[in-house]
Structures are given as structure tokens and as C-alpha cells.
Amino acid sequence: MNTTILRGGRVIDPAAGTDTVADVVIRGGRVVQVSPGPVADSGPVADSGTVVDVTGMVVGPGFVDLHSHVHSIAGQRLQAFDGVTTTLDLEAGLMPSDAAYAAAAADGRVLNYGFSASWSDARGQVLAGVTPTADFHASSALLGSAQWQRTSSPRERAAWLELLEGELAAGALGIGVLLGYAPRSDPAEYVAVARLAAAAGAPTFTHVRDLIELDPTTPVDGSREVALAAAETGAAMHHCHVNSTSRRHVDRVLGDLDAARASGSRITVEAYPYGMGSTSVGAAFLSPERLRETGLSPSSIVMLGSGERIADERRLRHVRESDPAATCFVEFLDERDEADRARLRRSLAFPDAIVASDAMPIEWPDRRADTREWPLPAGASTHPRTAGTFARSIRLMVREHALWDWVEAFRRCAYLPARVLDEVAPAMRTKGRLDAGADADLVVIDPAALTDNASTADPVRPSSGVRHLLVGGSFVIRDGALDTAAYPGRAVRGLPR
């Protein structure tokens, strides 16, 4: 059995809170030893091994992204250069999850992967008669349809709850709830989802509905709804991208969530370091009427790929009607403004806030679904957060503003996200840490070079500074270069519920 030794790096274990110079010994897909002194290059420790000198580098557990919509080899390769070793679609999910897992396994995956049960797909099947096919683009097209957004009858609610229960029984990693896309649905339905999740010992992952400040007529404030449901049911509830749904009200929202957690509610929070979101242009909250109410305008929307900035309401209505699944950018904060940049930093600095990318699919002028070519062919488009979320977060929070040290950076990017899934997927208990027995999902970073490079002008430019990345003990990136033959990613599945 081959052994790999990462020699002499600055080894971070966020589980223990340690930062020491050590050798890391890897065998059989696991870390077998973390030694503060040099281990032998030969003999029982390294009988047929490889020694990699990582002096001056930071070595830690690979990042766990709870919120990624890249179901492709191309997208996962971009995320690998951002330090990610496990990438999970938990906010939206896919249905049937068995089909999503099977498709990923058949194609091969660079990184570990997994899916939640999709609340929107289940409701779409029952309320709109749309049979889900475990295809993200088809599910995105559904989001612009009014049919599934309405409140369910008691019989309909029971039917889609039964579908979700079946998905959990099949190993889905919780329930993804795109509540912001059905913002007028009865809040009692959300409580029913939380109750189902609590009974199954599975978390929920919610894109919340509107805040009261953004829509005074909302049935309930979106972020407070998470806290209320958590308190009532005892469910573990994850608040997705608090920066984008809270906008300039993020301090109030974080205060409410902090109070709810202090009272015992099981709430986790994620954020990403961009003032620009991305979604399908047919989303309910991008209607001209809703934009006016929330202080945005059609010109806040830029179409992915073409770069068209929507000129006016007439053009917006046309785009929404003709291609509701088309991906767009939404500028909800002004990153040129220091006050808005500070809001993003406060979101990331919030106690125990998790870094998650909301990485988007890569789109191509010829509409291909994926590619194994590397470097990526010209013309690819996506949100810059797909390639740069984790490097950008660490650049801002560690290097530029000193709000985190390296232990805290790995805690936010690897340890805490892995812990969200401990109950539903015990296999996650050996991820997000760096000690004997941990999975050998590891990233080796040049601390002076780590930075994001992706922008709206060049959205698929990989991050810099990841020197090595291992998934299950296999190198995906070595000496800064991608191994294009490496597909070591494995499924992360929940226990049958």
C-alpha cells in the first residue's frame, strides 16, 4: 500500500485548534500519522512512498462546500483550485437523488459530492405535474413557474412531504428548501418540512423568503421564520447565503439569529464574499414589481454569457417570459462602497459563520453540459464565486483584515461545514480535520500566493496558491498543476432514515 508523506509543512487541525510544523503521513486514503518530527523515508512508515517537501506551506483539511451547483467535471476542477475537496448541492438539491448520485458516479468526479432532497422538485411534481429528472437546468426552469409556488392543499402537502421522506430514506443529505422562490406559500408548510427533518435526524438548508424590510407584506420575515421553525421543531436548520438574502439588513438578521442560537435553536449560517448574486432570471423575486419594492432595478441584473445589462422593465419581462431558466447576475451590494464591503466582512466574521460558495454551473456558447478539456475552452461563463469563493474569503479575512488566523480559516471552510452533516452522514465525521484517522482530503497552500483571480470579465480563471490538493489520498493538483486523469471523488450519502 503506497504511502505519501507531506514533509515539514505548517499543519492546521481546526478540530484541535492546533498550528504546528509537522509531517503528515497518508496511506489508504487516510491520514495515519501527524508527526511533529521527521518520519523515516523508508521502512514501515514509507515502504513504497512518495515524499513531498511542503516547507513554508500551510497544510490543512480540504474545504467542504455545502452550497455548490456545479455538477460537472469542469466546475469541480475550478473548485479544486479554490481548495475544495467536497462539494455538495444542499440548498436546491436534486430529485430523484438516486439518479443524481448515479449520474455523477457514471461520469466520474474530481471531488467528493452529494445532494439533498429537493423541496422545489417535490412540490413541482405534485403541484405542477412536472416529473423531476435530477437535472439542475430543468429544475431551474421550474422556478419561474407560478404553478408550484402556491400554497398546497392538505392532500398536496402530504403528497410532497411523502416524496421528501422517501428521498431521505434513500440517503439524501437533508432537505433543500428554496423558499425564496415561493415567497407567498403558507408558513405552516415550512414548519411541516422542519418537523419531517427533525424526525429523520436530517438538516434543512433554506434560501429564505423576503425580509420584512424588503417586503412588509411577506407572510413572515424570512430569517425569523428559520428561527421560529427551529425553536418549534428542534430541527437542525441551515440559513443559506445570509449576505445575499439580507443585503443591507444583515446586521439585524445576524442579531436575530444569534439570539435564536443563544436560546438553544440549532441554526447554522453561511456566507460568501461577493455583493453580486446569481440565479435564474425567472425567479419570483426578480419580477419588475418585486425589484421596485426591494430597492433594485432592472439594471441591477446582468445576463450571464451575453453580458447584457437589462435596460428596463419591458426588456426584463421579455427575458423572463422567453427564457426563465437563463442565468443572470444580481447586484445587491455595491462592492465599490466601503460600507457594503464591511457588511460582507461582518457576514463572514459572524461567530461560526460557514464559508459556502453558491457556485453556479458553467455555461458555454455551444450549450455543452461539460468538458474534460483543461484549460477550459474559451467562452465559458459562470459567477466568479464558482472559482474564487474560498481563496477570496481567506485573502480578505486572514491576509488583508486579520479577522481570522489560519486555524479559524480552516474552521470556517472545512471543520464547521463538515459538522453540519455529522448526524445524517457519519462518513463526514472524518472530514474537516487533520489528525490520525481523518480522511486524506487535504489542501496545501502557499500562504503568500493564495488569491482569487476570477472576475465578471474572466469568470473561470482559477484561483492561485493551491500547490497540492488530495482527495482520498490521491493528488488532483500537484505542484500547482491539475492531473487531468484524476477522478477520485466519492459520493457522500446519508444513512437510510
Image (tube, rainbow, N blue to C red):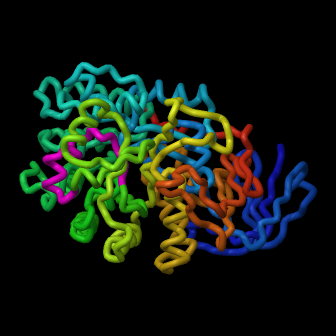
In the picture provided, is 255 more to the left or to the right than 406?
Answer: left
Q: Can I make out residue 419 in this image?
A: no
Q: In the rendered view, would you say 306 is above or below 227?
A: above
Task: Name the side, left or right, on which 486 lies relative to 79.
Answer: right
* Front in this rendered view, residue 317 or 474: 317
Residue 99's x, y, as percent? 47, 24
Q: Is residue 476 above or below residue 371?
A: below
Point 25% across, 67% down: residue: 248
Residue segment shown in magenta:
277-296
Q: Is residue 336 above or below residue 205?
A: below
Q: Quadrant of residue 242?
A: bottom left
Q: Write down the quadrant of residue 443 in the picture.
A: bottom right
Who's the residue at 59% across and 53% down the image? Answer: 461
The percent coordinates of residue 493 (x first, y second) are 50, 37
For image coordinates 32% across by 20% down, the residue present is 131
Q: Residue at 90% across / 60% down in the picture?
A: 41
Q: Is residue 293 magenta?
A: yes
Residue 300 figure quarter: bottom left
